[in-house]
Amino acid sequence: AQSVTQPDIHITVSEGASLELRCNYSYGATPYLFWYVQSPGQGLQLLLKYFSGDTLVQGIKGFEAEFKRSQSSFNLRKPSVHWSDAAEYFCAVGLITGGGNKLTFGTGTQLKVEL
Amino acid sequence: ETGVTQTPRHLVMGMTNKKSLKCEQHLGHNAMYWYKQSAKKPLELMFVYSLEERVENNSVPSRFSPECPNSSHLFLHLHTLQPEDSALYLCASSQEKGSYNSPLHFGNGTRLTVT
């Protein structure tokens, strides 16, 4: 069965600093990988996804993530964080077939941005 | 912005009550999902409906009963719940077409408190 580990429960960065959120996965096949963001009182919004091809994927809000098969990682990065990026970030891995998405989510990383 | 609408946003119910959560998607998708989000735990997939048929039931107690009358609407009927069922219940949808399945689009959730 697939699993996702987000080793950092909380991260605090200063506005304008760079950000990297870690995600490691365990999956027996080529994974489909996602990053979602959740603001307080909101549902999850898709930031970016990796299905195949270029291992560096660009997402919304200036985020990017790099798939590294050798490290089983899919870390999320942003070169300069804005105060509005404060939220909870979830990495997910999944099997997508007919019959719906079977996504497994990590426990999330809470990002705090200091002004 | 969300094309998935959930009502109510908040619900407080006693253990002997019967209530229902409603989800409506305006994205033309044909698969819908219920997830449970509890504090300090990963999102738990509860049910998946694909083309209005239930294709996934992740060992959810029978006090939770889903209903999908059409591809745009999804309900979660609740009865005789326990305090540990208090959580944020998220609805999501995606588009299935052959072997392709779009990423999940989430609603803002219903915050359920069982007293």
Image: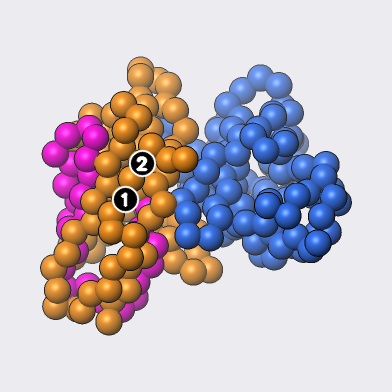
Chain colours: A blue, B orange
Is disc 1 placed on a helix, strand or loop?
strand
Q: Secondary structure at mark 2?
A: strand
Where is residue A109, by image quadrant?
Answer: bottom right
Residue B54 location in percent, x, y?
A: 21, 40
- Identified at 14% across, 39% down, the residue is B69
* Type of secondary structure dominating the magenta stretch: strand
Dots 1 and 2: beta carbons under 8 Å? yes
Choose top left, top right, bottom left or bottom right for residue A99.
top left
Measure the alpha-carbon separation of dots 1 and 2.
7 Å
Residue B4 bears which disc, if any?
2
Query: Mark 1 Cα within 10 Å, few/some/many (few <14, many 20+)?
Result: many
Magenta region:
B65-90
Specify the amino acid type for callout 2: Val
Q: Is residue B67 magenta?
A: yes
Q: Position of residue A95 (x, y in %)?
A: 46, 35
Residue drawn 85% across the image and 50% down it: A16
Q: What residue does disc 1 label? A: B6
